[in-house]
Image (tube, rainbow, N blue to C red):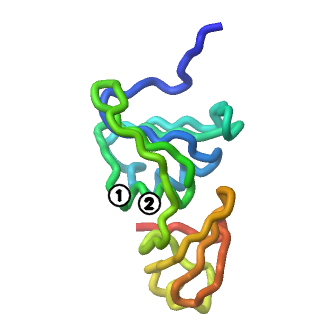
Amino acid sequence: MSKTRSVSAIENGVVIDHIPAGQSLKIIRLLHVVNSKQRVTLGLNLRSTSLKLKDLIKIENRLLTPQEIDHVAIFAPGATISRIENFKVSIKINCELPKTIRDVLVCPNLNCINHVESKGYFKLESSSNHVKLRCFYCEKQFDRDQVEEICL
């Protein structure tokens, strides 16, 4: 049996692989590529040996900043980010959860000043790929899925 690619190769850009299934749309919004001129290829619910199902994002002619890599890590702490040059991987980075994150997420606590100002500041904690966020202002802890992205 021959192997075929579910998603075609790109010449230059970035590939974000090993995203837990269902998280790629949040990452796409955080990276602000929905309304951009870059070609974006999205693979949803692809087969994976380690995750069973995974998502994949390919963005042509774009690189990620260290801050954007941290944003990816919030929703995919075990993801792999590959820089592609001339159809070949030039650099491969394993995402690691940052200790803190600013201005990306809003605190769901309606009484928190963070919720009103939409300038989130969270401490991040992880145990076996389960991400918890603690609001710097109200100090309440939330699961990653309870916290919404800031819409810019």
Quadrant of the frame with the C terminus: bottom left
Residue 111 placement: quadrant: bottom right
- Which residue was labeled with disc 1? 66
Kindly identify the amino acid type of the residue bearing the numbered disc 1.
Answer: Pro
Dot 2, how many residues are within 10 Å of its Cα: few (below 14), some (14-19), or many (20+)? many
Q: Are discs 1 and 2 less than 8 Å apart at CB?
A: yes
Q: In the image, is residue 98 above or below residue 80?
A: below
Q: Which mark is residue 80?
A: none
Image location (x, y in percent) of residue 19? 57, 45
Image location (x, y in percent) of residue 136? 52, 85
What residue lies at 29% left-to-right and 38% top-to-bottom?
Answer: 61
Q: In the image, is residue 55 above or below residue 100?
A: above
For mark 1, give the secondary structure: helix
Question: Along the horizontal axis of the image, is 86 left or right of 111?
Answer: left
What residue lies at 66% left-to-right and 75% top-to-bottom?
Answer: 142
Kindly identify the amino acid type of the residue bearing the numbered disc 2.
Answer: Asp
- Which residue was labeled with disc 2? 70
Q: In the image, is residue 76 above or below residue 62?
A: below
What residue lies at 48% left-to-right and 78% top-to-bottom?
Answer: 120
Q: Foreground: 113 or 17? A: 17
For mark 2, give the secondary structure: helix
Dot 1, how many residues are within 10 Å of its Cα: few (below 14), some (14-19), or many (20+)? few
What residue lies at 57% left-to-right and 79% top-to-bottom?
Answer: 107
Task: Kindly report the distance in space between the C-alpha atoms of the residues bearing marks 1 and 2.
Answer: 6 Å
Image location (x, y in percent) of residue 71? 46, 60
Q: Residue furthest top?
A: 1
Residue 15 placement: quadrant: top left
